[in-house]
Image (spheres, rainbow, N blue to C red):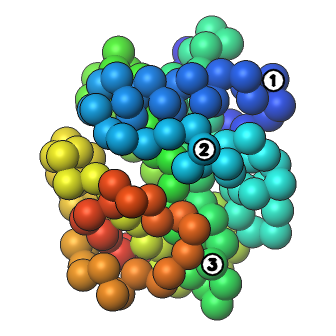
Amino acid sequence: MINIQPFSPEYAGQIYDFILHIQQKEFGLPVTREQQPDLADIPGVYQQGISNFWIAEHNGRLIGTISLMDLGEGKGALRKMFVHQDYRGREHGVALRLLEALKEWAHTHHYSDIYLGTADILHAAHRFYEKNGFVQVERNVIPDGPYILPVDKKFYHYQL
């Protein structure tokens, strides 16, 4: 059974390896551990105020992540959405379940807008976001912040 739940410290050791493997090995993105210090302190960065970080797990194994970072004034940034390659697609529905958890949290906590930046080579991710109500926007529409990585070249907006 696949479970979606808020991040808990027992998964801290798996997070960096899981995300870096997908970024670097699967997609060849030039993203380093040092560019993502937020992952060293998920509770301090993503589980304060009305931000949150969720994981998908199967038999104790981390298979997916997603987070919502509070930007203030009802705005948030979708961050760190990754699904293990063996669990991608409709068959498992992991990405959709992670996104639904994030949207439910955002609605409950009175967010009005969710933004995200992503690499231009992640075509399946673009289709997924667009199918789920995100609209591509220009970079200047996205609030500035440390959540935008140098590899982010496509930007999306979702209005609740």
The Cα–Cα distance between marks 2 and 3, rounded to whole angstroms, is 22 Å
Residue 42 left/right relative to 137: right
Q: Earlier in the sequence, mark 2 or mark 3?
A: 2
Task: Tell me the distance, in whole angstroms, between the alpha carbons under discs 1 and 2.
Answer: 22 Å
Residue found 75% across the figure and 29% down from its top: 12
The residue positioned 83% from the left and 31% from the top of the image is: 9
Question: Which percent across, then down, holds residue 16?
Answer: 61, 30
Task: Tell which of 35 and 103 is nearer to you.
Answer: 35
- Residue type highlighted by circle 1: Glu
Foreground: disc 2 or disc 3 = 2
Q: Is residue 154 left or right of residue 25?
A: left
Label 3 sits on residue: 71
Considering only vertical position in the picture, is 121 above or below 8? Answer: below
Secondary structure beneath disc 3? strand
Identified by mark 3, the residue type is Leu
Q: Which mark is residue 78?
A: none
Q: Which residue is mark 1?
A: 10
**Is the residue 112 above or below the residue 126 in the image?**
below
Rendered image quadrant of residue 45: bottom right
- Which amino acid lies under the numbered mark 2 shown in the image of this protein? Glu
Earlier sequence position, callout 1 versus callout 2: 1
Residue under the image location 44 percent in, 59 percent down? 149
For disc 2, the marked residue is: 34
Q: Tag 2: Cα neighbours inside 10 Å, few (<14), some, or many (≥20)?
A: few
Q: Please identify the quarter of the rendering in which residue 70 is found.
A: bottom right
For the residues labelled 1 and 3, the Cα–Cα distance comes to 27 Å
Q: Quadrant of residue 25?
A: top left
The percent coordinates of residue 58 (x first, y second) are: 57, 15
- Whether residue 98 can be seen here: no
Q: Nearer the viewer, mark 1 or mark 2?
A: 2
Residue 23 in view in this figure: yes
